Image: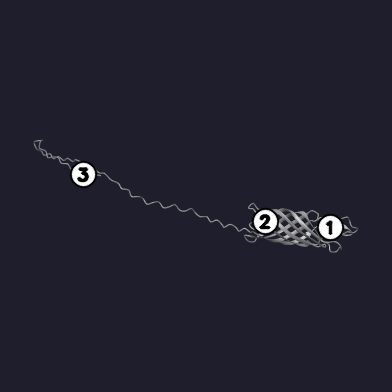
Amino acid sequence: GGGVSMPESTNILVSPPVPASVNPIEFDTGWAVMGSVGYRWDSNWRLEFELAFRQNDWDTKTGAPNSGELIFDFPLSDRTTLSFGAGLGGNLMSLDVKTVAGVNPDDDYVLAGQLIAGLSYQLTSRLELFADYRYLVSDEPEHAFNFGGPRIASYENDSHLVMVGLRYDLSPEPAPQVYTPPPAPPPAPPPVAKQYIVFCRSVARTQSRTNWFATASRRTKFRRWARAKPSC
């Protein structure tokens, strides 16, 4: 990302002091660029490592902050996210005073930290547009120079940064899971034909029909016949 750097006005402390000095010092609004790489968890936390460069004129003050940052994202909607975080690292400060003869450029690396607030909008599934505000503070850098003898200059180094940029997700989204219904149970086997043996019995019905003739003798009797009728 890129943006603007706005240092706060500061007093330069020179040791040993010089007879004439200009305080407070007003740095001009400058520019800044930044790059970062990190990891985002499903719990909305992000851990990032940042490397930036900013420049402001007084004559010329440059800074190269680098820090590790822990940021939490608050989803406001499906595409919009509000973020708050903090970072801790270092800041390489360079001071080049071109208007004073005998003062050579000098660097100092100091401990630095920053507070972060940002807003991002998801353009695609893997690309976000973000805008950040960062308040950067650091230890006072010390620069050695020669002005009527060896001297040390130190000053407070607090800055406001407003950054705009793009954030790209390097890990592709997993493929959506498609529900696959369980396979249908196999069809029931055809019924097995069963064979039965049926036993039938014959029920003999004896039907007697006796014809009696009006004869004088009971001994005369037509014989009895039987007719069998099967039943199953």
Position of residue 151 measured from the top left corner of the image (x, y, whole percent): 86, 57
Q: Residues within 10 Å of mark 1 (few under 14, many from 20)?
A: some
Say if mark 3 contacts mark 2, CB within 8 Å: no
Q: Is residue 2 visible?
A: yes
User: At x 22% / y 44%, what residue is drawn?
Assistant: 230
Position of residue 2 measured from the top left corner of the image (x, y, whole percent): 72, 62
Q: Which residue is mark 3?
A: 229
Q: Amino acid at mark 2?
A: Gly
Q: From mark 1 to mark 2, how far is it between C-alphas?
A: 36 Å
Say if mark 1 contacts mark 3, CB within 8 Å: no
Q: Please tell me whether mark 1 sits on a helix, a strand or a loop.
A: strand
First in residue order: circle 1 vs circle 2 = 2
- 66 on left or right of 171: right
Q: From mark 1 to mark 3, how far is it between C-alphas?
A: 139 Å
Q: Amino acid at mark 1?
A: Ala
Residue 218, located in which quarter of the rendered image? top left
Q: Which residue is mark 2?
A: 38
Q: Which residue is mark 1?
A: 144
Q: Amino acid at mark 3?
A: Lys
Frontmost of labels 1 and 2 is 1
Check the picture and name the quadrant holding the C terminus.
top left
